[in-house]
Amino acid sequence: MKKCLLVLALTAALPSVASAQEETAPDGSEAFGIEPYVGVLGGYHEFSRQSEFGSPRGGRMNGGLVSGVAGVNIPLGPAFVGVEGNATKGFGDIDWEYGVKGRIGGRAGESGLIYASAGYQWVNGKRAYSDEKDWIYGVGVEVGPKDIGLGGVTGSSGVRLRLSAETYDFDSIRPMAGIIFHF
């Protein structure tokens, strides 16, 4: 009797597993697959005086940033995981930053994402600041055109606006904003 109930339960579950593979995300893309993306971001990175960069001039290390990012998301129904790399040109006290991080989050609305990230970042200082590397943590949101009323302007091109805030080993704040193109 127990075997019969187990077989019936498994048989009833099979159609739901098969239909889960055919699901689509709210934006019409596949619910399971691979979504590569690239983007351009701008922002500012300000370190505290207590960071490992020290304060050789009595101040704190900071500077503007222009960043190129590339990554891939793996949708898992309403959630996703991913990996992203960045190469960033700095201005002021920062020469270059580059790194890699993992992302995990959920889909929001018809084409948006909300996520948390963690990874490793290399920072090259200038003007007597040293080069260092350490962990970076962050949170962010990506808003698609459908979510802000511009669905007809971009069609299904996959353009998203990104806002994020990150911290380098909890010694800095790094707000960034830009455009992400996913395909």
Image (tube, rainbow, N blue to C red):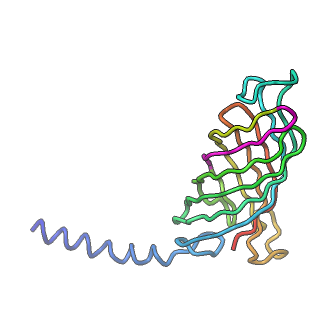
Segment colored magenta: 116-128
Q: What is the quadrant of the N terminus in the image? A: bottom left
Query: Does residue 103 appear left or right of residue 38 in this picture?
Result: left
**Could you say which is closer to the camera, residue 77 or residue 162?**
162
Inspect the magenta stretch and tell me whether residue 137 lies in it: no
Q: Please, what is the dominant secondary structure of the magenta stretch? A: strand
**Could you say which is closer to the camera, residue 147 or residue 56?**
56
**Could you say which is closer to the camera, residue 125 or residue 79?**
125
- Toward the right, the furthest residue is 92
Q: What percent of the width, then of the height, locates residue 178?
A: 81, 57
Inspect the magenta stretch and tell me whether residue 120 lies in it: yes
Q: What percent of the width, then of the height, locates residue 80?
A: 56, 60
In the picture, residue 92 is in which quadrant? top right
In the picture, residue 130 is in which quadrant? top right
| Count of marks placed on residues | 0
* Image height of 32 relative to 171, above or below: below
Q: Residue at x 52, y 75 (%)?
A: 23
Q: What is the quadrant of the C terminus in the image? A: bottom right
- Toward the left, the furthest residue is 1
Q: Residue at x 78, y 78 (%)?
A: 155
Q: Residue at x 19, y 68 (%)?
A: 6
Q: What percent of the width, then of the height, locates residue 63?
A: 86, 40
- Toward the top, the furthest residue is 58
Q: Residue at x 74, y 77 (%)?
A: 156
* Image height of 86 relative to 175, above or below: below
Query: Does residue 75 appear left or right of residue 89 in this picture?
Result: left
